[in-house]
Image: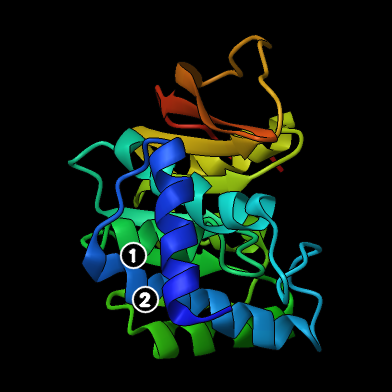
Amino acid sequence: MTSLEFRDRLARRARRAKAHLTLSMLGPLEAYFRLLAHWNATINLTSLQLNEPSDEAFDRLLVEPLAAARQIPDASKAWYDVGSGGGSPAIPLKIARPALRLTMIESRERKAAFLREAIRTVGLAETTVLNERFEEVAGTSGNTGTADLVTVRAVKADPELFMTAGLLLNAGGRLLLFRPAHDASADPPGFARVSTVLLTDAPPAYLSSYRRMFHVEQTR
């Protein structure tokens, strides 16, 4: 796929999802996608086919994060992405919202190495990688209550996820869950659902936003 073909296709998919995409974002997004495809040949970063990518691959890796960018409050600054793996949604979302200070949490060393290389290749400012478990990062006293935003790509959000995210988030901070299906379950303790929006429709992908209401105490 040529650079022109890549950019035209991404622009079409973004328009379909009504996602904001500017000319200045195309270069960094392409650089990230091609680096991901290169590393994915030797490290399992994503199960999606990247050599001849489908529309689903474009949507899942690039368009969903771009569509999610408009759901982030303007006042947000400090942001943690959990289980960053292959870098999506974090890296495309950072490209769309460059003023955010991004910390990617990835416990697997080789995936953390990819994320560091992606930061260098794409040229992302104020972006770091922590090669640690989410629980370890959230349990560090210096991190408690420091986050305006936590993002997670999750098939199922269990109570432990909310509890751990609650340790990082300040009062009023947002937890954004990227999900393959709409979840109408009750709000977990300490959180209030703000919205659930459809990001892309083929296949459907949703973003649920929760606001942290009060400090979540860590139990031992």
Q: Which image quarter is the N terminus in? A: bottom right
Distance (Cα) linking label 1 and label 2: 7 Å
Considering the numbered disc 1 on the image, is that residue within a helix, a strand or a loop? helix
Q: Is residue 108 left or right of residue 146?
A: right
Considering the numbered disc 2 on the image, is that residue within a helix, a strand or a loop? helix
Q: Is residue 219 above or below residue 96?
A: above
Amino acid of disc 2: Pro
Residue for point 38% across, 55% down: 79
Relative depth, front residue between 220 and 18: 18
Relative depth, front residue between 64 and 163: 64
Q: Is residue 209 above or below residue 94?
A: above
Residue 110: x percent and y percent? 72, 86
Residue 28 visible in the shown view: yes
Residue 200's image quarter? Answer: top right
Q: Badges 1 and 2: C-beta atoms under 8 Å apart? A: yes
Q: Is residue 171 above or below residue 42?
A: above
- Frontmost of labels 1 and 2 is 2
Q: Which image quarter is the C terminus in? A: top right
Residue highlighted by disc 2: 28
Residue for point 33% across, 64% down: 95
Residue highlighted by disc 1: 95
Relative depth, front residue between 75 and 142: 75
Residue 171 visible in the shown view: no
Residue 136: x percent and y percent? 63, 63
Residue for point 44% across, 49% down: 12
Q: Is residue 21 left or right of residue 39?
A: left
Residue for point 47% across, 26% down: 210
10 Å crowding of disc 1: few (<14), some (14-19), many (20+): many
10 Å crowding of disc 2: few (<14), some (14-19), many (20+): some
